[in-house]
Image: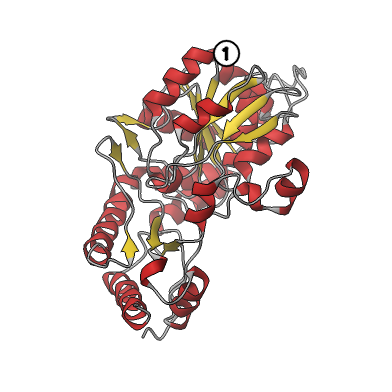
Amino acid sequence: MRKEFLTYGLPLIEEDDIAEVVDSLRSNWITKGPKTHEFEKRFAEYIGVKYAIAVNSCTAGLHLALVAAGIGEGDEVITTPMTFASSANVIIHTGATPIFADIDPVTMNIDVNEVRKKITPRTKAIIPVHLAGHPCEMDEIMELAKEYNLFVLEDAAHAVYTKYKGKLIGTIGNATAFSFYATKNLATGEGGMVTTNDEALADKIRIMSSHGMSRNAWNRYSASGSWYYEILHPGYKYNMTDIQAALGLSQLAKLERMQGVRLEIAERFNEAFGKMPELEIPPEKEYARHAWHLYIIKLNLEKLSIDRTEFIEELKKEQIGTSVHFIPVPMHPFYRDTFGFQKGDFPQAETTFERIISLPLYPKMSKQDTEDVIEAVERIVEGFRK
């Protein structure tokens, strides 16, 4: 057993990251400015899109994209129940109604056949979520969207580096929102990015991210700027800062290296856990390049004498941190009480939730950390095998 607790998730912050942030601090420009613009430029180049708008969170990016697309009161937006609440919260923030379509039990991503069942004349958009870093079935989703004239906003909070049929996520839907939260594959502490190839949409998102102003602070206060501005829309305070962007620039420069470590850990986990009939390892479909933001095992509970909660407690005794991604959104009190959801409404999401555990997987983990996780899981399975 480990002597020290292995935290579930940590960022990889190295000297180059620190130096980039210090450079921003010494420049005396710490809000949105030159580093933010450079980060947007480099991220757009990396993804392969025309426009990238840096924001203070993926949640902000999702909200801005929906508002810019004209989603509002009376509209319906379809998303998955197996996601963090922000994917649904942003729909409510626009005045629209979230509609949930059940999941594919293998990938845990939204089931396109279930999406079709939920489309009504009020449906205006779909928010597919690339859970854990595995892409959704985007060809089918885009075909459905074309058939019904729907806006597709990809929630790529887990999907920096993910590819679908050779295309990087961020290039397929009408817009895509990424997260740079502290535990994400590319971390800026807090922060996010919206990508799109739609110039009008990008312009509106950019303006709305900073109070709806015609000029941001860099445009007004730099040597080439002008004090004059106009409020073009009732916007939001959603912009990224140069401190965050500085960290983003250094993280983006080593993303491929960090992804290599994630892949090594995932492959080692697959090798070890794939031999255990009590566990189901994460899928990687032939069309996918997995970002391995999360490593989610499913317990075959009929082969174990403990449930998921007890398994997590046993891992804690072994000094291994874990999480669960996610409690289905309709199970949360606000959604259950507001929309009248009941047990059995989303059977695949509900039964999957009872089986899943997210294990530690991040570039800061050592090879010994990886082996400690494997050994702990092996001991628990052996001790509670039926």
Callout 1 secondary element: helix
Labels in figure, total: 1
Residue 219 in sight in this render: no
Asked if 371 appears above or below 88 in the picture, the reply is: below
Colour mapping: secondary structure
Q: Please give left or right for residue 131 compared with residue 280 in the image.
A: right
What percent of the width, then of the height, locates residue 243? Answer: 56, 46
| Few, some or many residues within 10 Å of mark 1 (<14, 14–19, 20+) | few
Residue nearer the viewer, 323 or 29: 323
Q: Quadrant of the C terminus?
A: bottom left
- Identity of the residue drawn at 51% across and 52% down: 22
What percent of the width, then of the height, locates residue 280? Answer: 33, 59
Residue nearer the viewer, 137 or 337: 337
What percent of the width, then of the height, locates residue 328? Answer: 58, 50
Q: Please give left or right for residue 176 compared with residue 256 in the image.
A: right
Asked if 257 appears above or below 268 in the picture, the reply is: above
- Identity of the residue drawn at 56% across and 20% down: 202
Residue 39 in sight in this render: yes
What percent of the width, then of the height, locates residue 211? Answer: 74, 28
Disc 1 target residue: 200
Q: Please give left or right for residue 256 compared with residue 160 in the image.
A: left
Q: Quadrant of the N terminus?
A: bottom left
- Amino acid type at image mark 1: Ala
Q: Please give left or right for residue 275 compared with residue 355 in the image.
A: left
Residue nearer the viewer, 260 or 155: 155
- Identity of the residue drawn at 39% across and 32% down: 169
Asked if 104 appears above or below 77 in the picture, the reply is: below
